[in-house]
Each structure stands twice: as structure tokens, then as C-alpha cells.
Amino acid sequence: MAPFLQRRRPAITFMLALFGAFCASALAGNAQETAPLGHNQSQPPPFVQANKTIRVSDHVYVIPDGRVNLVPNIGIIVGSRATLVVDAGMGPRNGQVVLRELAKVSKNADLYFTYFTTTHFHPEHVTGVQAFPASTEIIRSEVQEKELKQKQPEFISNFSKRTPEIKALLQDVKPRPPDILFDHELKLDLGGVTARLFWVGPAHTRGDTAIYVEEDKVLFTGDVVVNRFFPIFPDQDASGKHWLAILNQFEALQPRTIVPGHGEVSDAGLVSKEQSYLKGVQSRVAELKAQGKSSKEAAQLLSAEFQMKYPDWQNPGWIADAVERFYSEPD
């Protein structure tokens, strides 16, 4: 178990940083935004919700995504000696909202040491940390850090071209390197509660990382599990077969509460629902491949089929990407 870091900055530093963040100006505008990586769907701008934080267990709070694309569920895990924030929204403006919500649930902020970690490198999960005080300890897996360095500039450029709101959110983003790197797993003693961070990728990304709050049996899955969203296969590093293996790992933990990357907080049944969808795609792809259908033909057929099967799930454009990834993987 990683020891609690005894190095504490003066409380005034943290409080001044919070005050400065709270006074920053809000962005204006109500333009629609696109779903990740080019699949269009009308949505409100990707702003983290203020005053919506919910308590999901003794030590865990969640700022829900409001079912808005490019806004993740954000976690705040509160111990007696330290707090861990999981993901932070897109850009400093959203990070400021997270800090305000953090202050509400951290009753003795001057005694708290704050850690920050990310489930994966995508801008809506990572770049909000820009607003966090310098005293925040950033934790990341080695694989995720490598992927972030390789891909984040392209992703930020891609996202910034979509709407004026997204461009404004990302325009002041500067890289914040991690203070702590780990290879496969790290345990944090936050005081009365333990957060286990473990690298599980590749699935949605190479660097997918889960956070399990052991005493509360709360699992943060990142985008490896989503609720009423079709799982996203954003590039060639995504893996359908390994994704299914990760879901088996999640089930073995026997969590009581699942905090998905996107969509409502739920119970362990959420993992089973995602397994059912991905296994269904994998099975149907194998059938169509055996019939001599091309990947494009399979994607066209199965997009319609699975959209009808899951009519209340958002982002159906991602079905085709899942089909093509499974099609390209060895049987």
C-alpha cells in the first residue's frame, strides 16, 4: 500500500488557489457540440454541472455527467487525511467547477492533501486539472502517460475544431506532468478508505485505468463501462477481445456500485449489460465474416440491428466502429 505522503503545503496556498479559480469568468454560449471523434449528435455544450454532486457511498461523491457528450462522471473520494479526484472535465473552466464541488464535500480543506487521477487520456477527462492548485499530486499509469504524450495534441486539435465552446474550453490548456507514475497498480491510503488504481487497458484506450474504493465497493470504470451509451472504439488501439476480458475482471471484484465513464451511476448489473452488447457484436461479426461479408457490409447491417436492439442508447454511430474492430481481430 502506498503510504500517505506526509508533505503538506500551507493551507493558505490551497485556499488562495480555490479563490482564484472561483473568480474566473464563465464561458458563454449555447451552441450544439458533436459526439467524440466525429459522430454527430446534438447535445448541450460540455460543461460540468455545478450543484449536482451526489453521495454514492460513505466516502465517495460523484459529479454526474448530465448525459452530455464530452462530460464525464467525476469522482471525489474523501478520506480523513486526503482526497482523490477522478477525472476533471474539459479545460480549466470545468476544472474550476470541480474545485468548487470539492470544497463543498471536503469540510476541512486545510487538512486535506489532494490527489488527482484519470481513467484515460481523452481531453474531457484530463484537461480540467489545469485549474487545480500546484499542490495537487497527479497520478497516472506509465502506459496512460505514454499514450497521452503521443496522442493528446492531436485530440485537442481535433476537439477544438468542433464548436466555439470546445475551442474556448481548450485554448488555455497546458500539459501537467504526473507527480506519481505506476506500472500496473497503486494503492492510496486516504485515511479510513483505500483507493486502488489499476491499469486495465487496452479497451477503450491503451491506458484505461480503473479505480476501486475497497471499503465502499465502488468501482470507477472510465469509458470501459458506460450506461446507455454505445461503447466507443476511438482508434486502432481499442480492443474488443481485451475489453471483454476486462469486464470479467470487473465482475470478479463484486462491486456494489459502478461509476461509469458516462451515464448514470448504477450497480454491478451495468457490467453485465455491456458484456451482453459486446458479446453480441462479437458473435454477429463472426457469423457475417464466415458468410463472406466485408467489414463495411457487416458494419452497415449490424448498425441497424443493434440500434433497434438498444433504442435508448446514445451515440449509435459507434456501433460501426465496434464492428470493424471485432472484424479486424483474430478469431
Image: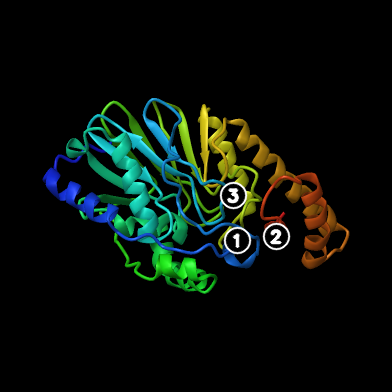
Does residue 319 appear to the left or right of 218 in the view shown? right
Count of picture labels: 3
Which residue is the extreme one toward the right?
291
Q: Which residue is drawn at 50% across and 53% down?
A: 71
From the top left corner, tell me how far across and down residue 236 is, in percent. Answer: 59, 65
Q: Which residue is drawn at 54% across and 49% down?
A: 223
From the top left corner, tell me how far across and down residue 42 is, in percent. Answer: 64, 60
Task: Name the residue that disc number 2 marks.
Answer: 317
Secondary structure beneath disc 2? loop
* Residue contact at pointers 2 and 1, CB within 8 angstroms: yes
The alpha-carbon separation of the residues under discs 1 and 3 comes to: 24 Å
The crowd level at tag 1 (other Cα within 10 Å; few <14, some 14-19, many 20+) is: many
Q: Inspect the image, locate mark 1, and give the three-letter code of the amino acid beneath it.
A: Ala
Asked whether 84 or 204 is in front, the reply is 84
Secondary structure beneath disc 3? helix
Task: Name the residue that disc number 1 marks.
Answer: 35
Secondary structure beneath disc 1? loop
Q: Inspect the image, locate mark 3, and give the three-letter code of the amino acid beneath it.
A: His
Asked whether 171 or 180 is in front, the reply is 171
* Residue contact at pointers 1 and 3, CB within 8 angstroms: no
Q: Residue at x 52, y 74 (%)?
A: 161
From the top left corner, tell me how far across and down residue 305 is, in percent. Answer: 82, 52
From the viewer's perspective, is residue 26 above or below residue 74?
A: below
Q: Inspect the image, locate mark 2, and give the three-letter code of the amino acid beneath it.
A: Gly
Name the image quarter holding the N terminus: top left
Task: Name the residue that disc number 3 marks.
Answer: 242
Q: Residue at x 39, y 67 (%)?
A: 149
From the viewer's perspective, is residue 251 above or below residue 184?
A: above
The alpha-carbon separation of the residues under discs 3 and 2 comes to: 21 Å
